[in-house]
Image: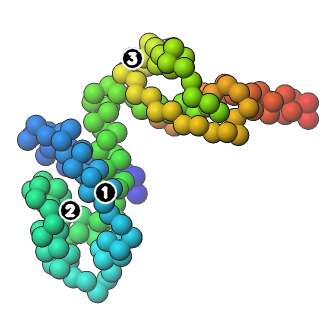
Amino acid sequence: MTGIANQYALAVFSLAKQEKREIEFLTILENFTGGVDEETQKFFAHPKISKLDKKEMLEKVLQDKLLLNFLKVLVDNDRIFLVQAVALEYKNILNELNKLMNVVVISSNPLSKANLDKISKKLKSTYDRKIEIKEEIDKSIIGGFRIEFEGNIIDETINKQLEDIKSSLID
């Protein structure tokens, strides 16, 4: 479904770009998806609720015309369930355009600003992109850190080193 979500994201991104609202629309889209609870999902997924009723409900709660029209298209095509995937794809498109890479650094304790700066500087020079780091704490890590970005993992944890040693002893 990611391919379909990407197509919708590209379409709505081009409309937002025409209006010079690419960043603003991302915020609006993320606010909408963040507010979608289980009850709302059930409403939109219910087969006995007409598309017209679903679109009328959207008209009552949304002020942004671009978001409203976009969600109506998703309702018309029975794809409203894709809205969160579309929001993620939209953000990826915007990040790519702005040469921004979101990076998650995982360690057992918070890293110093100096270490985070080193990681950021190295990734920036390697990938020629702006780096945005989010730190996560994982107490199962004995020491070191793991970096995750765009499907890549750089694992510099002691856990990984021990796993590699164990694997080499078994072979």
Asked whether residue 37 is in view, the answer is yes
Is mark 2 in CB contact (under 8 Å) with mark 3?
Answer: no
Q: Nearer the viewer, residue 111 or 30?
A: 111
Q: Which residue is mark 3?
A: 128
Identify which amino acid the numbered label 3 is placed on.
Asp
Is mark 1 in CB contact (under 8 Å) with mark 2?
Answer: no
| SS of the residue under disc 3 | loop
Q: Which residue is mark 1?
A: 33
| SS of the residue under disc 1 | helix
Vertically, is 39 above or below 34?
below
Which of the 4 image quarters holds residue 60?
bottom left
Q: At which x and y percent is residue 96?
A: 32, 31
In primary-sequence order, the first of circles 1 and 3 is 1
Residue found at x 36% / y 66%: 37
In primary-sequence order, the first of circles 1 and 2 is 1
* Residue 71's disc number: 2
Determine the CA span between mark 1 and mark 2.
11 Å
Identify which amino acid the numbered label 1 is placed on.
Thr
Quadrant in the picture for the C terminus: top right
Which of the 4 image quarters holds residue 35?
bottom left
Q: At which x and y percent is residue 129?
A: 37, 21
Say few, some or many: other residues with alpha carbon within 10 Å of mark 2 (under 14 / 14 to 19 / 20 or more).
some
Residue found at x 16% / y 66%: 61
Q: Nearer the viewer, residue 154 or 145?
A: 145
Residue found at x 65% / y 33%: 108
Identify which amino acid the numbered label 2 is placed on.
Leu
Say few, some or many: other residues with alpha carbon within 10 Å of mark 1 (under 14 / 14 to 19 / 20 or more).
some
Determine the CA span between mark 1 and mark 3.
31 Å
